[in-house]
Image: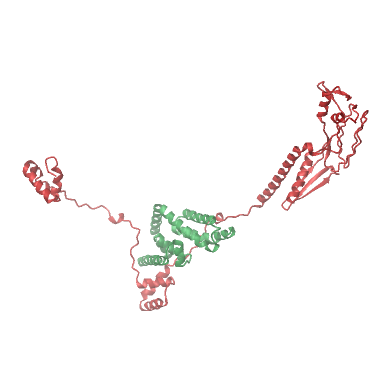
Amino acid sequence: MTINRNNYELFIIDYIDGRLSPEFTDEFMAFLNQNPDIAHEIDGLADIKVTPTPVTVPFAKETLKRTNKLPELTLTEADYLCIAELENDIVAEEALHLKELKKKSPDISRLSTIYSKTKLKAEVIPFPKKDSLKHIRIIPAYARIAMAVASVAAVLLIGFYVNILLVKTNRNNLVDVQQPTRTVIEQQNNPSTEKKVEIASGEAPVTKPKPKTSVKRTIPKVATEKVQTPETTIDLKDEAIEPMITIEPQVAQLAQQEPQSDININSNSNLNGQSVATTNRVQSKTKELTLGDIALKGIQKLGQAVGINIEVKQIDDNKAKKIVVESKLLAVSATILPKEE
Amino acid sequence: MTAEEFNKCVDLYSDSIYRFALKMLKNTDLAMDNVQDCFERLWIKHRDVDFAKAKSYLFTSAYHAAIDTIRKEKRKLEYADEAIFERSTTNGYSDAKEILDKAVEKLPEIQKSVLLLRDYEGYSYEEIGEITGLNESQVKVYIYRARLFLKEQLVSIDNLF
């Protein structure tokens, strides 16, 4: 690098500090000889120095010092032996040596006494929230009772619901009590049977259900019908099921569709003024189930399934039934009143 | 360990853990949090921890939790420590026990831990090593250093009177 008037300043500080290499020093001196104005500028520059003024902080330096280290302590033989004795970590030879030291110097005995005071004595500091730490899994009595009741209630409700669903879905097939049904269609299709049928109007075979243990029902005779419907005696063994009369609308519709047939139909006017045929009423008898009956069946089935003892008791002179559910946890009873007439 | 055994651990060791945490942390709230955290951790692992090992598990947990807390709360604890020390020195020392307590508080955490476990709980060097993660020799050295420091404190105070 050639020193010229544009870059000479780079070399001045190094020249003053004496850090300029010999080659550059020679070159720099040659440059100064060629440029006396710059040499005059540099002259005396090396004598200019800033000297530090001695200043002391106005407070003790020790207050600023921080350390986590403890002062270095030298563990002497006596210290070691005393601590080992206290820690019960002393071997027989060391114990003997310590004993001799104690005999020789009362200071060693005093040292041993001081060390014995460094043994920390456990204080009794009870933890104030001890109970909050415990994990108690004992469920309170009221909670257990509530859970048991809720469980039984839930099971019963599910049983009722399932039973109701079953009854609804199978309603048409539920009970068709022993009375053979004869319809007009059957009579038409059966040539051997006299087609002329006269049905006495107003003799709808509506019978009131009677809550008797054994019910005998007599179907009224048809006046001019040659093929008589035989009297049928129905024994409803299941006392809980009461008969219900259903009307099959198909019969009336078919009768209206074939007015010219030989079937003698007495017509009645209904509320709309339309002629409603009353045919030889089909004596269809189905069992009428009350909600209580369904509930009873449901509970009985449920009881059989889960092994709970369920009893049905007749109360109030057999007018009402009382369902009693008994288990280990609780006893529930429900009274079913008879259907009001 | 069953729930019943866990509850038995609460009865047996919660006071000891609390005392250890209180000595380490010098703050009742932090010490109580420490104890609750320790037992919560034990409950989470209670099926895997034997009843016989529960105390060691609790102290290990308490030790590490205390060290973590000290690191987190170092500035606050230093301030509290200084305040306590100033109050004590102002009022004067009442007895050797108080002097010793103050001296213990001035010990480094590791020395204080091993000394507390040694003197309060009676653990062996090996057991303390298991709790603190140190080897037996290190434990021994820390205990010796701690006792030497306590002796110096007792002697220096003794010389004042």
The answer to which image quadrant residue A291 occupies is top right
Identify whether A259 is placed above or below A29: above
Judged left or right of residue A130, residue A280 is: right
Identify whether A201 is placed above or below B57: above
Judged left or right of residue A42, residue A111 is: right
Image quadrant where one finds the C terminus of chain A: top right
| Count of residue discs | 0
The answer to which image quadrant residue A4 occupies is top left
**Residue A93 point in image, percent of width and height:** 40, 78
Identify whether A234 is placed above or below A305: above
Task: Looking at this view, name the residue that lies furthest to the top.
Answer: A273
Identify whether A294 is placed above or below A278: below
Q: Residue at x 93, y 30 (%)?
A: A226
**Residue B126 point in image, percent of width and height:** 45, 66
Any part of residue A13 in sight: yes
- Nearer the observer, B131 or A270: A270
- Nearer the observer, B4 or A231: A231
Any part of residue B25 in sight: no
State which chain is coloured red: A
Judged left or right of residue A309, residue A279 is: right
**Residue A69 point in image, percent of width and height:** 34, 60
State which chain is coloured green: B
> In the rendered view, how is the structure colored?
by chain
Q: Residue at x 48, y 53 (%)?
A: B29
The answer to which image quadrant residue A219 occupies is top right
- Nearer the observer, B16 or A62: B16
- Nearer the observer, A253 or B137: A253
**Residue A123 point in image, percent of width and height:** 48, 63
Image quadrant where one finds the N terminus of chain A: top left
